[in-house]
Image (tube, rainbow, N blue to C red):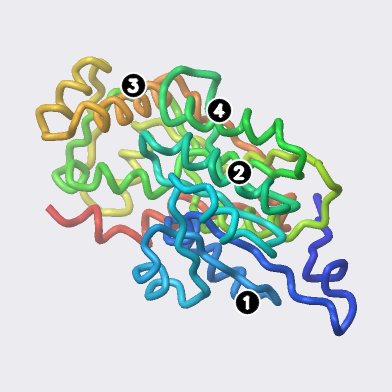
Amino acid sequence: MIVPRLITEGTMSETPTARRPRIALAGATGRVGRTLTKLLAADSLDLVALTRRPSEAREQLGIEVAEIDFANSKTIEDALKGTDRLFISHGTSPQQVTDEIALIDGAVAAGIGHVVKLSTMGPATRRNPVAWHMQIEAHLAQQPISSTVIRASAFAEMLLSFANQISTGTWNGAGENGRVNFVDTRDVAEAARIALLEDIEPESQRIYHITGPRAWSMQQLAAEFSRVLDRSVSYKSRSLGEQRAALLAGGLPPFVADLFTGLEQFFRDSALAETTSTFQELTGKPPRKLTDWLVENAAAFRQA
């Protein structure tokens, strides 16, 4: 079992006069970020959320907020002055690479000691968003600061994008017989908290692969949905071309349709099927089960 030494247990706060560690969060209002912020709020820390929408973030999070402009590097550097560590989790968009690299460069300029980046598991690929994360990770690896990359498998919340179909009893996709490991974002947040608080050496570089306890085929998932919802749910597989055409016909713009089709390719190839013991080694407890997540969110899949 990995037993990380945390900065809240000593080091930066060992003396009564030592200041509390200060952590900046970019992406604090996202799925992982919201949970991570709540976890860190219980620690002896100073927190600041970096955002382009300060009023919205302040209302949601209840912590200090600093407004930044990704097109103006000085706003990022100024917001990070006096900060010890930075968490980065950018929403999927064409600006993701540019914006996350701007945050990394701002962290280096501001003298931050440790960056934790939320990334994704997956193969070397030209498909986004995995390809974007690869570019950002490569840039982070070249910086003269310590870093930790949290590579998570597929978020369980991703299944909500199929909720309307599942509620009708027929779920269409291109996953064929591939398998996917779905992880609870609460587990990802717990791993990120540990990574942010670890007492690590300067320029140390770490990667944690965070997954759920097992991988599922689409057919197994349909059977589990049937059990949880107490009604029949079937999975109908089609080609990747047919899937993309269906997404476009449903009104999705080509950019989004391509992202979802790429995701289906990963499902089909079992590219996100890896199961690791990392979460349990970090926390001392097993990862949350997908079945429990399905039970908690069953109402979303019952609405026709």
**CA–CA distance between discs 2 and 1?**
26 Å
Q: How many marks?
A: 4
CB atoms of marks 2 and 3 within 8 Å: no
Q: Which residue is mark 2?
A: 104
Q: Which mark is residue 208?
A: none
Q: Which residue is mark 4?
A: 134
Q: Nearer the viewer, residue 234 or 131?
A: 131
Which residue is depicted at the point 64% across and 49% down? 107
The three-letter code of the residue at mark 3 reads Glu
The three-letter code of the residue at mark 2 reads Ile
Q: Nearer the viewer, mark 1 or mark 3?
A: 1
Residue 212 at least partly seen: no
Mark 4 or mark 2: name the one nearer the start of the chain.
2
Mark 2 or mark 3: name the one nearer the start of the chain.
2
Q: Is residue 237 above or below residue 110?
A: above
Q: Nearer the viewer, mark 2 or mark 3?
A: 2
Q: Which mark is residue 176?
A: 3
Q: Nearer the viewer, mark 4 or mark 3?
A: 4
Q: Which residue is mark 1?
A: 42
Mark 4 or mark 3: name the one nearer the start of the chain.
4
| Residue 176 locus on image (x, y percent) | 33, 21
